[in-house]
Image (cartoon, grey):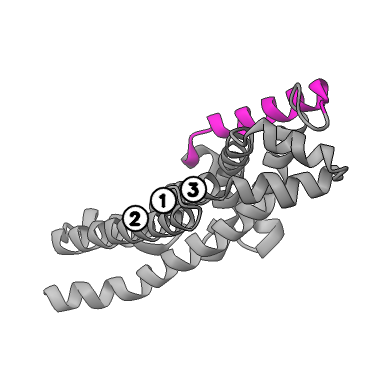
Amino acid sequence: MFSDAIQMLIEPTFSTIYMVVGSTIVSLLLGVPLGILLCVTSAGNLIPKPMLNNILGRVINILRSFPFIILMILAFPLSRWIVGTSIGTTAAIVPLSVAAAPFVARIIETALKEVNPELIQAAKAMCSSNMQIIFKAMIPEAYPSLVSGVTLTIINIIGYSAMSGAVGGGGLGDVAIRYGYQRFRVDIMIGAVFAIILMVELTQFLGDRIVGNIMKKRGLI
């Protein structure tokens, strides 16, 4: 029975990894520009635009407030339009990305706002353009916080991917519900939970190692 459970979990595990990787890439592509825009348009920053900043902030807060299950159901038409279906692992990447992108945006904004203002002033004194200040001063300086934020994002997406199984998203969450819960296969339920925990622990370990290496190179630890 135990070997049978392992066999049943192999494909869903890879499906979950596929969902997480795809969603992470898309959410970063959407969230990073939004986070940079939120930071630089805030009061006292490079390009202060209070109205734009306020609108962006409110939209992101609204998206972040939606429970993921509801957001996934609302995103069914978008998934169907983009990938041609609203069920399956590929379709689940759409709502996962939509749910994670606002989270990424806030992480990027917070990390960039932690950059020492004196560094920005020094870059301005050297006649650097705003783009140069953002990409050659602020982002490199914020690397540790950015890596920690991306690590946290991936962990959240892993959790979201498990919930997506409840509404046809596939992966470990789907197997845990259909076989572990509905068919009373405790071994499959435990195996699915263990696989998810392992993914989270591995992600956190790698994120911490990368941050530690960055800090060590800077002589901070």
Depth check: give the residue in front, 108 or 68: 108
Instruction: Give the residue at mark 3.
Output: 153
* Amino acid on which the number 3 mark rests in the picture: Thr
Mark 1–mark 3 Cα distance, whole angstroms, equals: 5 Å
Mark 2 or mark 1: name the one nearer the start of the chain: 1
Depth check: give the residue in front, 57 or 166: 57
| Residue at 61%, 46% in the rendered image | 141
Instruction: Give the residue at mark 2.
Output: 200
Placement of 90 over or under 117, stated as above or below: below
Disc 2, SS: helix
Place of residue 171 in the rendered image (x, y in percent of width and height, measured from the top left): 40, 63
Tell me whether circle 1 and circle 3 mark residues in contact (CB < 8 Å).
Answer: yes
Depth check: give the residue in front, 204 or 116: 116
Answer few, some or many: residues within 10 Å of disc 2's Cα (few below 14, many 20 plus, some between 14 and 19). Answer: some
Range of residues picked out in magenta: 48-68
Residue 46: image quadrant is top right
Which mark, residue 155?
A: 1
Disc 3, SS: helix
- 57 in magenta: yes
| Residue at 80%, 21% in the rendered image | 50
